Amino acid sequence: MSETALNITGLTYRSLGDRAADYIRDLIIRHQLAPGTRLPEETFASSLGVSRACVREAFMRLESEGLLRRVRNRYTEVAVFTQKDVKEILALRCAIEVLSAKTCIENGRIPVEELRKQVDVIAARSEDAKPDTMAIMESDLDFHEIIIRASGNSRVLDVWNRLKSQMKVLLFTALINKSNVMKLRGADVHRPIIDAFIERDQDKVAVLIEEHISRSSMVSIEG
């Protein structure tokens, strides 16, 4: 019996549960579902036109990302982040990024050109006449993800991906406070990090990343 050659290159199938999770995740990040809001499965199934099984799948995914919380198997609600949660999330983010940056320098895999292009994206989105908060947030996190991917550590990338949704909630919280947008969005915050990479200065890169995340922390907690 001959073997059948399988080729799944480019396979992009996504289940209804995945798409439901994307929709609900976006509502949570944009604060259209407030912290502590209860989410009845039947209500979402009806409004999204999918089965309760699909909604249940979406809820499980978002619970694993830390955006939802199941209360004693009775109901599901949007997670509430305390100041302790914020500090822990940002401390973990800092550890991930500093480790990744140092690994890039040690291994000589420094994605300077890719980072420069991303800074241009950040600048363009930040300086738009009507800045898109979600787009600014995404471009900021994309800059840092470039560093993490370049480190080549798949397990660190896995932790980053599982933490990303929580970071988006916190960063969006910061950015919707218009008085704080300039503290977080500008390309000027990111260019010195690139310069430190070019200098292959691990300590300087670490300090700049820590300072950037620290500013995000202050705004998230107080803003």
Image: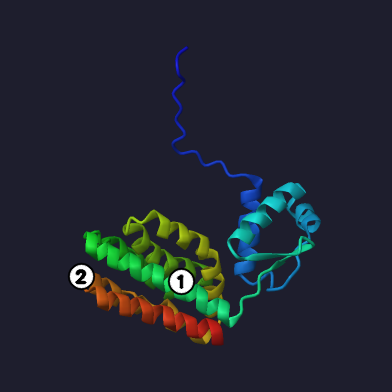
Q: Percent x, y for residue 219? A: 50, 84
Please count the marks in the image. Answer: 2
Q: Amino acid at mark 2?
A: Arg
Please tell me in which quadrant of the rendered image residue 144 appears.
bottom left
Residue at 45% x, 76% y: name it: 91
Labelled pair 2, 1 in contact (Cβ < 8 Å): no
Among the 4 quarters of the image, the one containing residue 185: bottom left
The residue that disc 2 covers is 200
Residue 193 in percent (x, y) is at: 29, 74
Q: Is residue 153 above or below residue 69?
A: above
Residue 203, how many percent across, how many down?
26, 77
18 or 191: nearer the eye?
18
Name the colouring of the figure: rainbow
Q: Secondary structure at mark 2?
A: loop
Residue, disc 1:
92
In the figure, is residue 72 to the left or right of 148?
right
**Residue type at mark 1?**
Leu
Task: Check the image and report above or below for 203 versus 67.
Answer: below
| SS for dot 1 | helix
Q: Is residue 109 left or right of residue 190?
A: left
Nearer the N terminus, badge 2 or badge 1? Answer: 1
Q: Is residue 220 visible?
A: yes
Q: Quadrant of the C terminus?
A: bottom right
- Residue at the left extreme? 199
